Amino acid sequence: MKQLTFEIKSNEQIAKNVYRMQLGGDTTGILPGQFVNIRVQGQFLRRPISVCNITEAKGTDGVLTIIYKVVGVGTEAMSQLPIGTQLDVLTVLGNGYDLSKAGDNPLLVGGGVGVAPLLDYGKYLKENGAAPCFLLGARSKSDLLEMEQFCALAPVFVTTEDGSEGEKGFVTQHTLLNHEKFDRISVCGPKPMMVSVAKYAKATSTPCEVSLENMMACGLGACLCCVEKTVKGNVCVCTEGPVFDVNELTWE
């Protein structure tokens, strides 16, 4: 863990109640799937946010991108912060994706704001010789996030619940899953979606990992707010995760 100061470079709305914030600072050491914890002035608790993208540079010249949804007073306050604001940020938090087990053709599945950490992971995989594929789900076309960036990295397949983009339905109903076999599936999004993908992975004997989005408070394992039941007992998602192999979880 590092406690650092970042400066807001941009903070703009990209969808209904969803914002993209770019922070300038020291991004060294951050791995795909990890998260940061941001202190918001006037709020007692920090706000844990998944890392969407990082650009590393010498010193403090890196750029950290996060995608966040306004769901309460803390994130509402974040959405109003102007360019140039200095933020106290804890970085290099949590255990991210297992970078050694992705294989040659991994499938990255995301839904809603859960697509955010998959962008940085997809970039890492491509830079290291893999050929990732994205399967993204949303309620409608207007809820799809960062599509230009995803499409620039790898093939992108889409489902929307209303059929306004891609195939109509949920990610587990996409025809891609009927004829393609993947070395590993990595997932982030709403829990019902992740559970469905985990069931598909089990049925097809495909290794699968999920990034949990349990409610967090301290982000350091002290408050026990984000506890998840696993085959080894209860663990804190913020310290043991947020990424888990589905075989470690007790999902049915």
Image (spheres, rainbow, N blue to C red):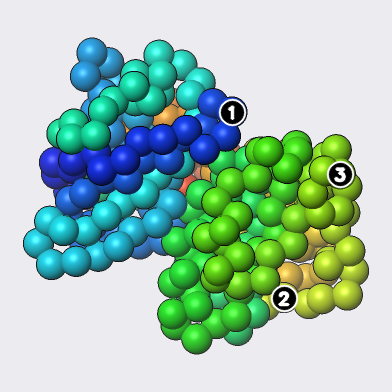
Q: Residues under labels 2 and 1: Cα distance?
A: 33 Å
The disc labelled 3 sits on which kind of residue? Gly
Corner quadrant of residue 80: top left
Residue 115 coordinates in the image, percent (x, y): 57, 50
Task: Point out the tag, 3 or 1, that comes first from the N-terminus.
Answer: 1
- The x, y position of residue 128, in whole percent, is 44, 82
Q: Would you call the spot at circle 2 few (<14 residues within 10 Å), some (14-19), or many (20 or more)?
A: some
Mark 1: amino acid: Lys
In the image, is 140 to the left or to the right of 48?
right
Task: Look at the image and tell me whether residue 57 can be seen.
Answer: yes
Position of residue 192 relative to residue 16, above or below, is below
**Nearest to viewer (mark 3 / mark 2):** 3
Label 2 sits on what residue type? Phe
Q: Which residue is mark 1?
A: 16
Task: Kindly identify which numbered label has been placed on residue 182.
Answer: 2
Whether tag 3 and tag 1 are in contact, CB under 8 A, the answer is no
- Tell me the tag on residue 163: 3
Which part of the image, by quadrant, shows the C terminus? Answer: top right
- Residues at marks 3 and 2 touching, judged by CB atoms closer than 8 Å: no
Tag 1, which secondary structure? loop
Give the secondary structure at mark 3. Answer: loop
Q: Relative to residue 55, is residue 36 depicted above or below?
A: above
* Image: 219 above or below 147: above
